[in-house]
Image (cartoon, rainbow, N blue to C red):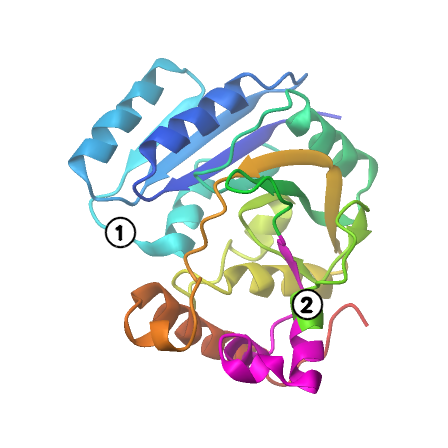
Amino acid sequence: MNRSASIVILDFLKSKRVIQNVESIIDQEVNFPVDIIVVDNSVNEDNAKKLLELSRYPNVRLVINKKNVGYIQGNNQGAKHATGKYLLIVNPDIVWREKDTLQKMVDYMEKREEIGILAPRQINDSNGKIAMTVRAFPKFFLQVARRTSIRKLPLIKKWVAYDEMQHLDYELTQEVDWVQSSFWVIRKELWHSFRGLNPDYFIFMSDPDLCFKVWEKGYKVVYYPRATVYADGIRLSKGGFKTFFKKWTLRQHVKDSLKYSWNHMLKGNPRK
């Protein structure tokens, strides 16, 4: 079977880390062709100039946007250039330290046609801990509650813990509701069947939305810790209720969460 992979990296002011990311992909030991698409949303001359260093790699395509088109449109833009059977959506801060990571993930997808999205284990550089990238399908009330003091109430605390999948054994390969799109492998045909990420959203909630659709279509979303990647661990949506009025990204998270709730209001869990 013909195997190939396309990797989309959407940058926002992380050129140094993106270069490390790409160079660690170049060092991957695989038996299939790989192309890399870097889309720069930074609208920053210095950042773009640094990214031009990547032009020395023949399998890297660099797209410099003249305006920040957002996370959704930026990734969809990059995916239009993808030629591989498998499409990888990869955050700019990811580094691949084990040289067989990409091979492992594509091999696993090849053997299991029922998998639509596969995600590896992520380790945070800042503390060496496993990033909690797996979640239950979102509920707007819990997304708000976990940023306020009411999350300490016994019942709310229990619901938030489940929503954050705090009980999950991150050492086990397993099916999950959804996994953050900081690193995804998805079948490109499946991606195109949904026309990519949902443009209803600007930054957040497109990942649970797409995972929901993958389950609806009869495919599985799987967390796969036998492959490991590394990230800086910085979350755009980090912050509590008071931060809402000061931080644009947090306010955008709330807006996108409301859109997700509206889009899925009358739908049951597609895994059941």
User: Looking at the picture, how far across and down is residue 85, in whole percent?
Assistant: 63, 34
User: Looking at the picture, how far across and down is residue 269, in whole percent?
Assistant: 73, 74
> Magenta region: which residues?
132-160
59, 17: nearer the viewer: 17
Residue type marked 2? Ala
Q: How many marks?
A: 2
138, 196: nearer the viewer: 138
Residue drawn at 45 percent across, 49 percent down:
234
Residue at the extreme left: 45
Q: Is residue 95 visible?
A: yes
Disc ID at residue 81 = none
User: Looking at the picture, how far across and down is residue 133, in whole percent?
Assistant: 62, 53
From the image, tell me which residue sits under label 2.
136
**As drawn, 111 above or below 66:** above
Instruction: Indicate whether residue 136 is drawn in magenta.
Output: yes
Q: Is residue 258 left or right of residue 62?
A: right
Q: Is residue 23 left or right of residue 42?
A: right
**Element at badge 2?**
loop
Image quadrant assignment for residue 70: bottom left
